[in-house]
């Protein structure tokens, strides 16, 4: 059993390394944007002889919205193509219920379009619809639908079923990571010795096995509630009092501002020091003793206080992990902390419930020993590695230049090298017991860790390290890189070379971009090329992954370098602007830094409020095709770029 637990820990360590890099199995709107709206069409005779109406209805997938035919930015386009003998009468009408939001004409639930036709005899009318659907944070690629109706017949055409946004696998990765942390807590010296004592208490202290199992189940439920309810209440109260905008602002501040990121970094280092044995993070003993005394009560009240006692006593081990899970989830949606804490607490409580249901399993549990402290130390190394991500975010958004890519990699290489040496018994900490020999499973873990170290070393010389692309600082922050001419390193295009000094930003793969739209459009008019607008962020994990996995493709890179003028808008950049570049919003709020100004521009101009997003503009500044969001489909991205060139 002990070997099995060590195997689980090995899988856990590997999973933490892998799942810290968010990715999507496919685009955020599923495999087919054509299925975000379900269309139906029918014809009806009007009061005028020989005149018919075609009613086209589109049922929009839950959680999404689209835009009216009258919208100026991203209108839904419906084209009717009559056959011989049929003529269109008047303009196409949009009968949808339209809500104006941020200058956009938004349609929820259902879009309804009406077209009158004149027909001397029967015939067919072809229908083509093109649209984009958006959630609160992402917009889908262009969807399309084609069909035809027979004039004179009342028919219904139903060819597509709505397909809503799929859950991001990055969110699932965060949930899976929380589950793994929850199971890992069972193996810590604060929790593991309590398992047999707690389960035995329920079995012996109950009038019957059935009553014992019921109490054990409630015990697990109370553990889940004690971890999940407080964070849920905090977020719910914030949302009720301040609304969605305030909640989003809070999480955006937590994700990008230097103060919370530095605090998070320090917290992670303190947690790591605790795991290494420097000290123990404990709650006041009076609180623990009071809860323990109340656990002697009969009924469910005693079970609740028993669960509360476990939560409090195990805090020195679970506290750092709970903090880790919550801090990492603050950069996601507002519900991410609640979901991840639920996942963590379910995994943490599950072993207690299972062992209470099947008490014979207690005999198979390994005895407590020094191996439990080894688990804590390994988790401590992981805490150190994870903590530097927050320092990196603050460094990137405020341009401090403290944690460039090679410095970040050097820290990780040293950290995981020390972990490997610890697994081999070459390092010992205060609470460790001497290691007489190296178990095979521990050796396997060390091999995996050292293999990861070897993988990272080429990154010190500019290797892309695509598996870690979402986690590392961008490669342009690296001082030393071996030039890669195949990827277009330091070869500016003609459209880029006309810029004056200080106007260009260095992007990955040797690409250069203007720092605002107006400068890019000036260059586009000189060169006669469209503009590629990169809506991005320094702390955007998925932006880095798009750059490493999609932009690096030779065909994509060639089009970006040779066919487009590039513009990069960082929406989380904290650099202060001179007063003449400040923007005052309609509400009177003055925007004074690069990130806030860029965020305002992309919301007003493109109707998006997330990154990454990509927009293609004509030299005159018109949006050529709908904005494209995060999607690792290289062929789809090539088609997106080519569609901009074609129009």
Image (spheres, rainbow, N blue to C red):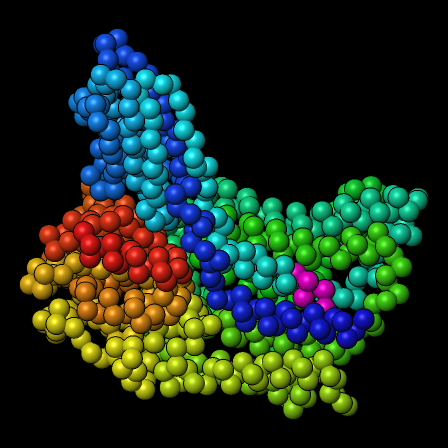
Foreground pick, 407 / 568: 568
Does the magenta-highlighted stretch encompass residue 433?
A: no
Q: Residue at x 49, y 71 (%)?
A: 387
Q: Residue at x 65, y 91 (%)?
A: 426
**Residue 398 placement (x, y as % from top left):** 30, 68
Residue at position x 9%, y 64% in the image:
527
Left-right relation of 589 to 175: left
Foreground residue, 147 or 93?
147
Compared to 420, does 133 lie above or below? above
Q: Residue 534's quadrant in the figure? A: bottom left
* Relative to 162, residue 390 above or below: below
Give the x, y percent position of residue 250.
40, 51
Relative to 361, 351 lies left or right: left
Please tell me which residue is depicted at 67% across the width and 66% down the height of the picture: 184
Q: Quadrant of the N terminus?
A: bottom right
217 vs 613, left or right, is right
Q: Is residue 12 above or below residue 591?
A: below
Name the main secondary structure of what is drawn in magenta: helix
> Which percent across, then down, holds residue 323?
56, 61
Range of the magenta residues? 182-187
Report whether residue 614 is seen.
Answer: no
Q: Position of residue 2 (x, y in %)?
A: 79, 73
Q: Is residue 185 rendered magenta in the image?
A: yes
- 420 or 533: which is nearer to us? 533
Please give the count of numbered marks on the rendered protein. 0
Q: Dividing the picture into quarters, in which one does residue 201 lie? A: bottom right
- Horizontal side of residue 279 vs 97, given as left or right: right
Q: Is residue 352 visible?
A: yes
């Amino acid at each position: 059993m002990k070997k099995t637990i060590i195997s689980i820990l090995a899988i856990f360590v590997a999973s933490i390394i892998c799942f810290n890099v968010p990715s999507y199995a496919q685009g955020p709107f599923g495999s087919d944007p054509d299925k975000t709206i379900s269309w139906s069409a029918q014809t009806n005779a009007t009061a005028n002889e020989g005149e018919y109406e075609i009613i086209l209805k589109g049922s929009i997938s839950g959680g999404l919205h689209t835009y009216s035919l009258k919208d100026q930015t991203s209108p839904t386009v419906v084209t009717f193509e009559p056959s011989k003998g049929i003529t269109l009468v008047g303009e196409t009408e949009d009968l949808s219920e339209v809500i104006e939001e941020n200058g956009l004409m938004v349609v929820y639930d259902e879009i309804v379009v009406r077209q009158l036709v004149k027909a001397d005899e029967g015939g067919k009318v072809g229908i083509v619809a093109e649209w984009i659907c958006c959630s609160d944070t992402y917009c889908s690629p262009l969807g399309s639908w084609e069909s035809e109706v027979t004039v004179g017949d009342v028919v219904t055409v139903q060819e597509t079923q709505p397909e809503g946004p799929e859950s991001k696998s990055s969110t699932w990765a965060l949930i899976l990571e929380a589950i793994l942390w929850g199971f890992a807590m069972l193996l810590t010296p604060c929790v593991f010795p309590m398992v047999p004592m707690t389960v035995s208490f329920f079995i012996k202290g109950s009038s019957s096995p059935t009553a014992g199992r019921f109490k054990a189940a409630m015990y697990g439920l109370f553990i889940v509630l004690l971890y999940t309810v407080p964070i849920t209440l905090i977020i719910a109260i914030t949302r009720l009092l301040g609304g969605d905008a305030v909640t989003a602002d809070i999480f955006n501040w937590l994700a990008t501002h230097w103060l919370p990121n530095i605090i998070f970094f320090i917290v992670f280092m303190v947690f790591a020091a605790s795991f290494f044995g420097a000290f123990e993070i404990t709650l006041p003993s009076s609180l623990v003793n009071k809860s323990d005394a109340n656990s002697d009560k009969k009924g469910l009240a005693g079970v609740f206080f028993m669960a509360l006692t476990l939560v409090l006593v195990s805090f020195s081990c679970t506290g750092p992990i709970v903090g880790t899970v919550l801090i990492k989830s603050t950069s996601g949606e507002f519900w991410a902390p609640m979901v991840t804490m639920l996942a963590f607490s379910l995994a943490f409580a599950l072993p207690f419930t299972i062992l209470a249901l099947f008490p014979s399993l207690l005999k198979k549990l390994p005895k407590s020993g020094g191996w439990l402290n080894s688990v804590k130390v390994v988790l401590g190394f992981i805490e150190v590695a994870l903590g530097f991500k927050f320092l990196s975010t603050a460094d990137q958004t405020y341009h401090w230049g403290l944690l460039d890519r090679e410095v970040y990699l050097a820290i990780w290489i040293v950290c995981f090298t020390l972990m490997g040496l610890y697994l081999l018994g070459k390092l010992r900490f205060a609470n460790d017991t001497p290691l007489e020999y190296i178990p095979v499973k521990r050796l396997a873990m060390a091999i995996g860790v050292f293999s990861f170290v070897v993988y990272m070393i080429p990154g010190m010389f500019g290797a892309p390290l695509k598996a870690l692309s979402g986690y590392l600082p961008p490669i342009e922050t690296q001082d030393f890189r071996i030039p890669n001419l195949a990827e277009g390193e330091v070869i500016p295009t003609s459209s880029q070379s006309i810029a004056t000094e200080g106007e260009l930003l260095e992007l990955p793969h040797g690409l250069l971009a203007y720092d605002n739209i107006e400068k890019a459009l000036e260059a586009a008019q000189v060169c006669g090329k469209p503009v590629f607008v990169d809506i991005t962020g320094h702390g955007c994990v998925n932006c880095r992954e798009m750059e490493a996995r999609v932009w690096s493709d030779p065909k994509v890179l060639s089009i970006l370098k040779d066919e487009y003028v590039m513009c990069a808008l960082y929406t989380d950049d904290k650099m202060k602007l001179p007063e003449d570049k400040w923007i005052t919003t309609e509400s009177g709020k003055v925007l004074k830094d690069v990130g806030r100004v860029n965020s305002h521009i992309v919301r007003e101009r493109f109707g998006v409020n997330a990154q990454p997003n990509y927009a293609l503009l004509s030299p005159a500044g018109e949006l050529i095709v709908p904005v494209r969001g995060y999607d690792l489909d290289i062929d789809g991205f090539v088609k997106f770029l080519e569609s901009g060139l074609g129009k």
